[in-house]
Amino acid sequence: MWACRRFFIEGEVSLNSRIDYHGAVYSLKFPIYFGVIMPQIALGFIGFIRPNNQIFLVIWYVLTFFYMVVSFKYLTAASYLRPSLSKIFIGLLSGILVLILEVIFAELFPNIQGSQLDPNMTPFIPLFACICGPVWEEVLFRGILNKRIFHGSIFGLVVSSLGFSLLHGYLSPLIILYFLMALIFSFCNRGKTDVSASIVAHIVVNTVVFFLNF
């Protein structure tokens, strides 16, 4: 309770000295700026200039690689990422379950489509869509919102799942699909803050969908 009070008043509470240089565990500054805002700015910049230079593409992937390295260092130190064979296996099964759910949903609502990607953006998207996006979304919704702030309560489960579905569902029947998806991602995790299983599941889903569509 005291930790939550300090979180809302001061913005940070240090639980792990190894990540002090990134900001404390309870601080949302680093996850929001680095995990959400920075990728959107970067992708928006790419979408605006629409580069077709191969050298630029190489530079983009080098920068993305370092972005992933910093991300995984932070998430490991903050105890959001503690993978094991059992968690990977659970994540794979959960990802397959979500893909089956998407097939069923597509049969029930054949005329509904999600967001469309500009073909010019396709070469720049894979690492973000298949790895960076799933990793940070799981940390923000399942790790921080559900587990850190609401301590894994039913209310936290509903709030985090609803937030996830509103972010992806675009106020259409897709909200139902993404809400169910968020529930599956939440239930496949174990432990106080670790979201390794749902990260694997989310990566599986995004990777399969991305390469089937593009």
Image: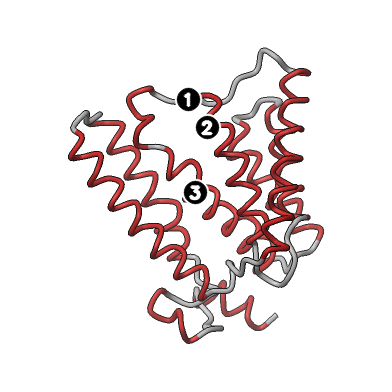
Q: Is residue 178 left or right of residue 153?
A: left
Are the residues at dot 1 and dot 2 in contact (C-beta closer than 8 Å)? Answer: yes
Can you give x and y, in whole percent of width and height, for residue 214 in the image?
Answer: 47, 25
Q: Nearer the viewer, residue 195 or 55?
A: 55
Measure the alpha-carbon separation of dots 3 and 1: 16 Å
| Residue labelled with disc 3 | 131
Label 2: which secondary element: helix
Query: What's the amino acid at mark 2?
Result: Phe
Nearest the eye: 159 or 41: 41
**Quadrant in the rendering for residue 212:** top right
Q: Residue furthest top?
A: 111
Q: Which disc number belongs to residue 210?
A: 2
Cα–Cα gap, marks 1 and 2: 6 Å
Seen in the picture, residue 2 relative to 127 is either above or below; the reply is: below
**Identity of the residue furthest to the front in this view:** 85
Crowdedness near tag 2: few (<14), some (14–19) or many (≥20) residues, C-alpha within 10 Å = some
Image point (70%, 14%), residue name: 110
Residue 81 has which mark? Answer: none
Question: Helix, strand or loop at disc 1?
Answer: loop
Residue 101: x %, y % from top left: 76, 32
Residue 94 appears at what percent x and percent y? 74, 47
The answer to whether 80 is drawn above or below residue 113 in the figure is: below
Per the model, the C-alpha gap separating discs 3 and 2 is 11 Å
* View extreme (right): residue: 154
Residue designated by label 1: 214
Task: Give yes or no for contact between labels 3 and 2 (Cβ–Cβ under 8 Å).
Answer: no
Quadrant for the N terminus in the image: bottom right
